[in-house]
Amino acid sequence: MSYKFNPFTGTLDEVGAGGGAATPGGADTQVQFNDGGALGGDAGLVYDKTTDKLTVGGDIDLDDGGTFSTTLQTVTPTANRTVSIPDATGTIGLVNGPTGSIQFNEAGALNGTSDFSTTLNWNNAATTFTGLKLNVTDTASAAGSNLLDLQSGGTTKAFITTAGSLGIGSGLNPNNFIQDGFTRNAGLALIGNNSASASNTDSYGALVRSPQVWLNGSGYLGWSPNLAVAATPDVALARDSAGVLKITAGSTGTGYLKLIPTTVGALTAAATVGAGTKAFVTDSTSTLSSHHGQAVVGGGTNFVPVFSDGTNWIVG
């Protein structure tokens, strides 16, 4: 009777009656293992001696403290781990790029870059850092291409186009945006809403261009028939000189300031609005010429301008 040392059990196993060798289990190239006290083989564990390639059809479990080594890396787990190879062409991907960089597929290999990172440590006052950078080489792209498209339930809620337009809100269209730097007028910012074109007279929005600022359709800061870049507003606020604001019809011309008439009793307290505040009342008991510089009294029929001195409303 012959015996052979079994490295799996640490015992001497009988290898065949009358000194004969044990019969290998499984098929050719299958790695042998103790299968219930006999040699066994399985198609999921195959070794090719010509290429020195070991093929494992299932998972590889690494016990605590175990080490799995290749020519590329060493994995030292703190608990059981599974190494999965998806198919015949699959590989175990290695992380790439600096710490914190998000991994992406680049020509079939994992890659990372500091321009696309989730973990940042800005600790050098002499360095200009970038929190998130996306650089697209756009040599040719279809109209409507976006650098950023934020969606909820498949519906775009905000976007940034390749031209630099920023769209915010629901029901977005090409003119529902905030845009800076029209080619026709550098330094212009346009905020549009629900318009089919930038010159739509029914649209509401804001046009900001040095030295004028105006809102289309609403008239809070100024008004223009449309949002066309070349349009001249009917009225606008403009800088006249240092510390001086003028009201103008366009960049030049005469502008007017209209104070909404009210009654003396409806005026907010002079101390509340503060000194220098102007108003216009319709029920003064005295005229401007007869009581200029005196506190206004209501209950009359005279139209007079008034101002606050911080304590009283004064005719003038």
Image (cartoon, helix red, strand yellow):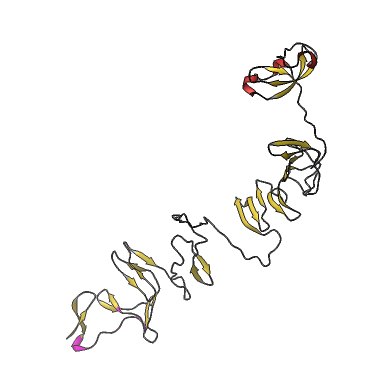
Q: Nearer the viewer, residue 26 or 5?
A: 5
Residue appearing at x 72%, y 39% in the figure: 241
Q: Position of 80 compared to 196: left or right?
A: left
Quarter of the C terminus within the rendering? top right
Tell me which corner region of the image, top left, top right, bottom left or bottom right, holds residue 281: top right
In the rendered image, the vertical position of residue 37 relative to residue 294, given as above or below = below
Q: Position of 80 compared to 155: left or right?
A: left
Residue appearing at x 48%, y 68% in the figure: 110
Q: Nearer the viewer, residue 66 or 135?
A: 135
Q: Nearer the viewer, residue 7 or 251?
A: 251
Q: Main secondary structure of the magenta part?
A: loop
Q: Position of 150 compared to 277: left or right?
A: left
Give, as a single range, the part of the protein colored magenta: 17-32
Q: Is residue 23 magenta?
A: yes
Query: x%, y% of residue 86?
Result: 46, 70
Query: x%, y% of residue 61?
Result: 34, 67
Query: x%, y% of residue 217?
Result: 77, 39
Tell me which corner region of the image, top left, top right, bottom left or bottom right, holds residue 304: top right
In the rendered image, the vertical position of residue 33 relative to residue 129, given as above or below = below
Q: Position of 207 compared to 52: left or right?
A: right
